[in-house]
Image (cartoon, helix red, strand yellow):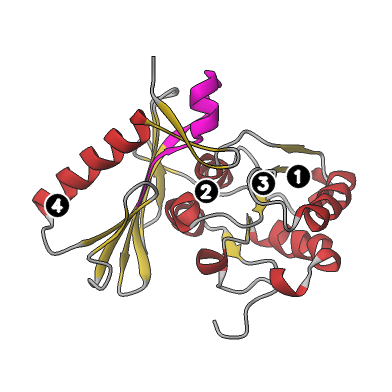
Amino acid sequence: SIAIQTKNYNDFVSEVDRSAEQAIINVLKDAYPDHGFWGEESGHENHEADNIWIIDPLDGTTNFLHGFPQYCISIALQQKGVLTQAVIYDPVRNDLFTATKGRGAFLNDKRIRVTNRSKLQDSLIATGFPFRDFTHLDAYLGMFKDMIKKTTGIRRPGSAALDLAYVAVGWVDGFFEINLSAWDIAAGGLIVQEAGGIVGDFEGNESWLETGNIVAANPKVFAQMLQVLNPHLTDSLKTPKNI
């Protein structure tokens, strides 16, 4: 059996999360002793370094604990505030998504691109439901209600990192979610961008990594998604004025 603890309401951590994160950090420390780390379980280490690894050792922990086959490892490198490297590994499908800034995105070493679908009404969209903080639940439900009326369908697999990877490879056309953490979206965001997609906050700006409010899609669908989401934005879901 796997030892499980609850961090907050509906927010679980298993021994797998902790041991996997420590193993990843140990390998990276050996290779890059001067780099910093930002992990979901261990927090910040050497956070003032120019090079910071952002690590989610198990994105989709609840899925993993229930045997639902949708979870992954997500790792990104941020250099002087800019995301430059990304890896997402899906152990169930043995899929490895990678990206290097300016050099494209890949699935198992094959170049990937976002879809070229032009209409939101023809698009399949991924999302994630609020599960631990329900501050924005009413706003989200309004977004969901309008989005489902204007798309082919909505999917909620339960791993934001994989949702973003699926945008990049073209398995879904777009993704949106509220109040995620940097380790959930750092790698996936870069992979989408390098696959030709756009990533932004709910007003299309670049605060998505800081706020955790994220929209990602191919360029044509991205703009249409923002139009659907915009009427439901509370002040706290808009781009912060200090970013």
Split into 4 quadrants, where in the image is the N terminus?
top left
- The circle drawn on residue 29 is 4
Of discs 3 and 4, which sits in the foreground? 4
Percent x, y for residue 133?
66, 51
Give whichever of discs 3 and 4 has the lower sequence position.
Answer: 4
Contact flag, marks 3 and 4 (Cβ < 8 Å): no
Q: Residue 19: within the magenta?
A: no
Q: Which residues make up the magenta segment? A: 55-72
Of discs 1 and 2, which sits in the foreground? 1
67 displayed left or right of 224: left
Give whichever of discs 3 and 2 has the lower sequence position.
Answer: 2
**Badge 2 is on which residue?**
113
Residue furthest toward the bottom? Answer: 242
Please state which of residues 8 and 188 is positioned toward the viewer in this rendering.
8
Residue at left offset 72%, top offset 51%: 134
Of discs 2 and 4, which sits in the foreground? 4
Percent x, y for residue 139?
81, 58
Residue at left offset 57%, top offset 62%: 199
Residue at left offset 88%, top offset 52%: 146
Percent x, y for residue 168?
53, 47
Amino acid identity at mark 1: Ser
Q: CA distance from mark 3 to mark 2?
A: 11 Å
Compared with 9, 120 (above or below) is below
- The circle drawn on residue 173 is 3
**Badge 1 is on which residue?**
123
